[in-house]
Amino acid sequence: MALSSGAMSLALGLICLALFAGASLAAAAGGDVAGGDNKLMMGRFLRWQAAYNRSYATAEERDRRFQVYRRNMEHIEATNRAGNLTYTLGENQFADLTEEEFLDLYAMKGGMPSLHRDAGRKQANFSAAVNAPTSVDWRAKGAVTPIKNQGPSCSSCWAFVTAATIESITKIKTGKLVSLSEQELIDCDPYDGGCNLGYFVNGYRWVIENGGLTTEANYPYQARRNYCSRSKAAQRAARISDYVQVPAGEAQLQQAVAQQPIAAAIEMGGSLQFYNGGVFSGQCGTRMNHAITVVGYGADANTGLKYWLVKNSWGTSWGERGYFRIRRDFTRSGLCGIALDLAYPVV
């Protein structure tokens, strides 16, 4: 049956109204979903703020940090969903920082000083005939002090590594494990830049010249450079007689770590910001910007993947309670350059 022109116009009008209403409802539904996601993410953000005692000076700054947090959470969840990695990422104290901000605050902005080997300095010379154990964990031998936290205001990883390796060799040689002072190194070592730039080899050099290092209790960490307290620095709790630079290579690193914890440098960045556990095998290069202490090695019980066991200086809420495991037998230089710049103190 043919429709009159009036009826046809009315029918078309009703169809357009229905389509418009449907589109409006769909848009509203989508808006509710997005709004719900925002509320869920904001709830997570507020719980994160409370957990890490984080506050912001203005509402604008809080909004900006929320957007950074959201992007980081999306990256973490997408990475973990991939399901083909040997490690996991997770929310931690760095969740409201961009990668650039994270590196500015927690790594050395100018990078580690260029590797320099003194021509007259003793070099490690491990015999190939000596087989290192299949696994080592100096924590189990009571030779590693608890995890410390350098904080965001002082790029002092070099001082933590200098102190950590001296703590360990002192325990191995004397049976006494004493926490030593990073602050003394930051304040008094003239060869390094305190909170700005430093190198564990220079740290060893100064400790030798000073005749030792005092305790953390006597000269506590302040996360800033102050005037050197000569009276505190004179109260020596541990001494070293020399230091040794280890030739580059994972085989040499293994031989060295079998004897004692070793100072090393790596490129820190990318997914390591949110490393949560497992054996890290992600992307990184050899532009070293962070100092760490290698305290052991082994193979993962579930995957069989070989790893280096590393002590870090970012507190226990990062990684595996302050430690991380990074893939071993990767290349001669090691993943993230971990086997390129190595040294240890001698008692």
Image (spheres, rainbow, N blue to C red):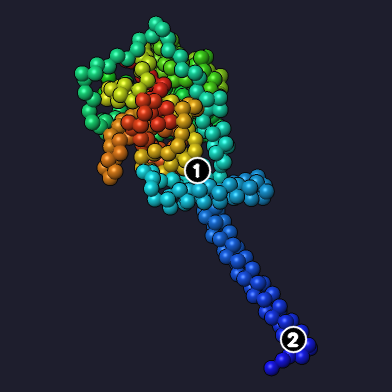
- In this image, 124 relative to 18: left or right? left
The earlier-in-sequence mark between 2 and 1 is: 2
Foreground pick, 15 / 53: 15
Mark 2–mark 1 Cα distance, whole angstroms, equals: 65 Å
Q: Secondary structure at mark 2?
A: helix
Identify whether 58 is placed above or below 185: below
The residue lying at 72 percent from left, 82 percent from top is 12
The residue lying at 26 percent from left, 42 percent from top is 301
- In this image, 143 relative to 317: left or right? left
- In this image, 55 relative to 83: left or right? right
Residue lying furthest right in this view? Answer: 6
Instruction: Estimate the x, y position of residue 261 in percent, counting from the top left.
Output: 33, 25
- Asked if one can make out residue 127 in the rendered structure from this viewpoint, the answer is yes
The residue lying at 46 percent from left, 17 percent from top is 115
The residue identified by callout 1 is: 93
Identify whether 320 is placed above or below 139: below
Name the residue type under label 1: Gln
Numbered label attached to residue 8: 2
Q: Quadrant of the C terminus?
A: top left
Foreground pick, 341 / 261: 341
Name the residue type under label 2: Met
